Amino acid sequence: MKSFFRFLKENYPAYGFYSLIESPKFQKTIPTVFTVAETEKFLASIETDSIIGIRDYCLFELIYSCGLRNSEAGNLLLDNVKLEQRLLIVNGKGRKERLVPFGGRASKALQNYIKLRALQHELRISKCRNLFTTLQGSKLSSREILFRFRYYADKAGLTGCSVHTLRHSCATHMLKGGADICMISRFLGHSSITTTQIYTHVDEQMLREAHYKYFPVNVISRT
């Protein structure tokens, strides 16, 4: 539709009716986030006594700790993992590449999974270079990742959430921990800081605490 009106504007400027038509404005909704306790509950619901469990724990730990999109996690290659430097090379939206650090827990999960993955692929003679794969040795799709997420979310008793909730939670927890909004924007691979600023509206408890601590009337009433 946008392209059609652009065509009219460029080829039939005399009519000018297009100036009377406004583009619809969509209000950005505040994303759903897990508390730290809910995130831990979700990850704890993944039993790591099988190759699938070890893979899934590594997958969702990485999505949370690195703030990855579903597609970014699914598209990760073995070569994108730099274990010694604790860095991921992530190919994001618009084929933009970024470096994302990960911590000790994610590093341990990656090491455990990559060892088992190597054995699994050796037995099946799979040449797939994707980090996260099925038992048959093919790439784990976004749909399969979503299916696995829903399974564990139901198991943990968490509702109204999606894979993206882990990414939103990562950003919100970083913000609450004191991270700079510009740094979070780079970390998430946002093209504009405007996209990241939605997280400043997420944590109501953080806002209440700030209001209680800094609003003059509250300060006076405590003295």
Image (spheres, rainbow, N blue to C red):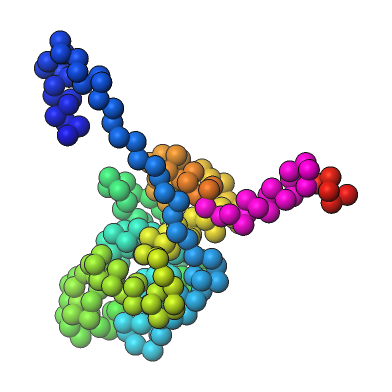
Q: In this view, does 86 lie above or below 138?
A: above
Q: Is residue 180 above or below residue 84?
A: above
Answer with left or right where residue 154 lies relative to residue 108.
left
Which quadrant of the rendered structure holds the N terminus? top left
At 23% from the left and 76% from the top, the residue drawn is: 134
**Residue 103 visible within the image:** yes
Considering the whole magenta stretch, tell me its main secondary structure.
helix
Q: Is residue 210 magenta?
A: yes
Q: Which residue lies furthest to the left in this view?
A: 11
**Residue 87 visible within the image:** no
- Front position in the image: 82 or 203: 203
- Front position in the image: 128 or 159: 159
Answer with left or right where residue 88 lies relative to residue 4.
right
At 19% from the left and 18% from the top, the residue drawn is: 17
Q: Where is residue 205 in the image (x, y as percent from the top left)?
A: 62, 57
At 58% from the left and 54% from the top, the residue drawn is: 204
Q: Residue furthest bottom?
A: 49
At 32% from the left and 51% from the top, the residue drawn is: 92
- Front position in the image: 19 or 61: 19
Q: Position of residue 81 (x, y in %)?
A: 36, 64
Answer with left or right where residue 191 lies relative to residue 122.
right
- In the image, the segment drawn in magenta is 202-218
Q: Position of residue 110 (x, y in %)?
A: 40, 73
